[in-house]
Image (spheres, rainbow, N blue to C red):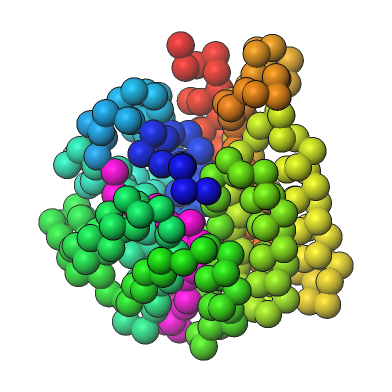
Amino acid sequence: MLSYQHEYHAGNHADILKHICLCSILGSLSKKEKPFTLIDTHSGAGRFFLDDERLLKTGEALNGIKKFVQEVSTIKNIPQAIRDYLEIENPYLEKGLYAGSPEIERQFLRKGDICHLSEMHPEALKSLEENVAKNLITNGGEKKCGGKCVVHAEDSYKSLGGLVPPLVKRGLILCDPSYEDRSDYRQVTDSLKNAHKKWNTAIIALWYPILPRKKNETSQMLCELEDFAKLGQNPCETKKFELEIYGMDEIPKEMLEDSAPHMTGSGMFIINPPWQLEEKMTEALTILKSIFHKKNLS
């Protein structure tokens, strides 16, 4: 779907959930000296300007990352997963930028690590190629990326099929399509089942929106992936972490209509979750829910 532009949504509550989870997983992979492979199937531009008129129009960053940073600053005991995420994100925010998934991923790369980034949207692809050539922004200034990044101007699902299994078999697949195209649900299911079959040791992190009008499609996708992971030839553990902005009895009627585009929350579905990810995300979600529940957004 080439019409989707993340510039309207960068830094919203769904991004924050995804990026906290991403940092926790990459932190776990980085604890061992052995190299890892990272595949990001829907990369986007990598960096976003917080004063972009598209982002200002939606107000999603204002009610997302800006609100989050302000609220977290008042908390005494910040969960480790949130601290790790903000340590990476804050230097970008100070420069009026928001670091997306590729930029966060590059922060963790070391010599021997490789990151594959797939993007099809012409504008996002151009920005991605420019951004991965730049130095990383850190608390101490700037630094070069320690590993290798390869940008693929190719259909995300086709690219994933050709990249697995990689030579370095420790690693992560991050999949976060827009779900604007109804076929995404089926393509995600098929491509991740195939990827897990060919690369069964990989951590797979799937982001998904919680949309009342797509409840059945989401449930079918997650159930099929969970059954395949737990009951297939290579049984493994799965975990699901969700941030719901509304309770089921609080969702406005207009958001339940078939044409309603708004998310009522989002989630991360993980195959082969690393050790302690559940504990870290449970702590982080307690804070996220206290900040982003709809009654706290007014």
Q: Looking at the image, how many numbered discs can be counted on the residues? A: 0
Question: Image height check: is 228 above or below 253?
Answer: below
Whether residue 168 is visible: yes
Is the magenta region chiefly helix, strand or loop? loop
Q: Nearer the viewer, residue 91 or 214?
A: 214
Q: Is 46 inside the magenta-drawn segment?
A: yes
Question: Image height check: is 248 above or below 20?
Answer: above
Pick out the residue farthest to the left.
141
Whether residue 201 is visible: no
**Residue 72 percent across, percent down from the top left:** 38, 31
Please give left or right for residue 69 compared with residue 290 in the image. Answer: left
Q: Which residues are the magenta region?
A: 31-48
**Residue 225 percent across, percent down from the top left:** 76, 58
**Residue 183 percent across, percent down from the top left:** 67, 50
Please give left or right for residue 217 compared with residue 116 in the image. Answer: right
Instruction: State the image quarter where residue 120 is shown.
Output: bottom left
Instruction: State the image quarter where residue 242 is shown.
Output: top right
Residue at the spot 54% in from the left edge and 45% down from the top edge = 178
Residue at the spot 53% in from the left edge and 71% down from the top edge = 159
Question: Image height check: is 32 above or below 61?
Answer: below
Please give left or right for residue 8 compared with residue 204 in the image. Answer: left
Pick out the residue farthest to the right.
231
Residue at the spot 29% in from the left edge and 43% down from the top edge = 48
**Residue 8 percent across, percent down from the top left:** 39, 34
Q: Nearer the viewer, residue 128 or 20?
A: 128
Q: Is 85 inside the magenta-drawn segment?
A: no
Residue at the spot 71% in from the left edge and 28% down from the top edge = 212
